[in-house]
């Protein structure tokens, strides 16, 4: 992984980069191929280094943004779909809590990796419930695609972090 703190560019081991510019919300979460000659760092170089902290912070902040948006959108779900509302909120919140727990367990690599894996699984479950809500027309298709793309970005970064 590679993170340039000043422009917050995150490069995954798969060869893609995610721009996390706070000034340009439109580019946040979009993947692009790295420019020729750009260097990549391994995600396994140390959990405590500044690069991994920036990666973690980007993923955590994105997960919080997604949770807040899901919470707001799920308010409009029909009351008879209470199960869907509860599940989608539960799993989107679980992504955030597992990321927080992972960071607090960073000294123990296996616990850290397990919590990151749990966060990735919760993100996958949230995607499934988002897809269901979209198919039932509870969530606009464009909003679903945007949230799904953000979760795909998080999932790709988490998979890179969990590789040994």
Image: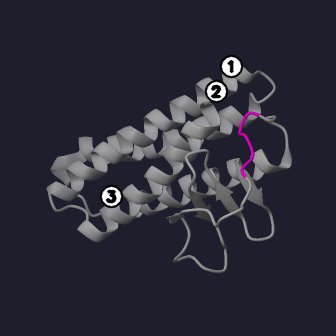
Q: Nearer the viewer, residue 105 or 10?
A: 10
Rendered residue at 31%/61% (across/down): 144
For the question of whether residue 74 can be seen, the reply is: yes
Residue numbers of the magenta segment: 40-44
Give neighbour class at mark 1: few <14, some 14-19, many 20+ (Cα, 10 Å): few
The image's mark for residue 110 is 1
Whether pointer 3 and pointer 1 mark residues with C-beta atoms closer than 8 Å, the reply is: no
Type of secondary structure dominating the magenta stretch: loop
Q: Residue at the right extreme?
A: 49
Q: In this rendering, is residue 109 above or below 26? A: above
Q: Position of residue 32 (x, y in %)?
A: 53, 65
Colour scheme: one colour
Q: Is residue 12 covered in magenta?
A: no
The image's mark for residue 113 is 2
Mark pair 2, 1: CA separation: 5 Å
Mark pair 3, 1: CA separation: 35 Å
Mark before the other along the chain sequence, 3 or 1: 3
The image's mark for residue 74 is 3
Q: Does 29 sit left or right of 121 as displayed?
A: right
The image's mark for residue 22 is none
């Amino acid at each position: 992984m590679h993170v340039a703190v000043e422009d917050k560019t995150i490069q995954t081991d798969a060869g893609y980069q995610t721009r996390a510019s706070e000034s340009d919300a439109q580019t946040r979460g979009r993947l692009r191929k790295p420019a020729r000659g750009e260097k990549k760092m391994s995600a396994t170089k140390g959990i405590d280094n500044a690069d991994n902290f920036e990666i973690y912070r980007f993923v955590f902040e994105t997960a919080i943004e997604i949770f807040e948006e899901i919470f707001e959108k799920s308010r409009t779900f029909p009351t008879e779909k209470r199960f869907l509302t509860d599940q989608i909120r539960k799993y989107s919140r679980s992504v955030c809590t597992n990321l927080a727990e992972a960071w607090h367990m960073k000294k123990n690599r296996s616990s850290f990796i397990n919590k990151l894996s749990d966060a990735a699984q919760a993100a996958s479950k949230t995607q499934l419930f988002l897809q269901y809500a979209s198919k039932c027309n509870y969530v606009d298709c464009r909003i679903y695609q945007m949230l799904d793309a953000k979760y795909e970005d998080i999932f790709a970064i988490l998979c890179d972090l969990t590789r040994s």
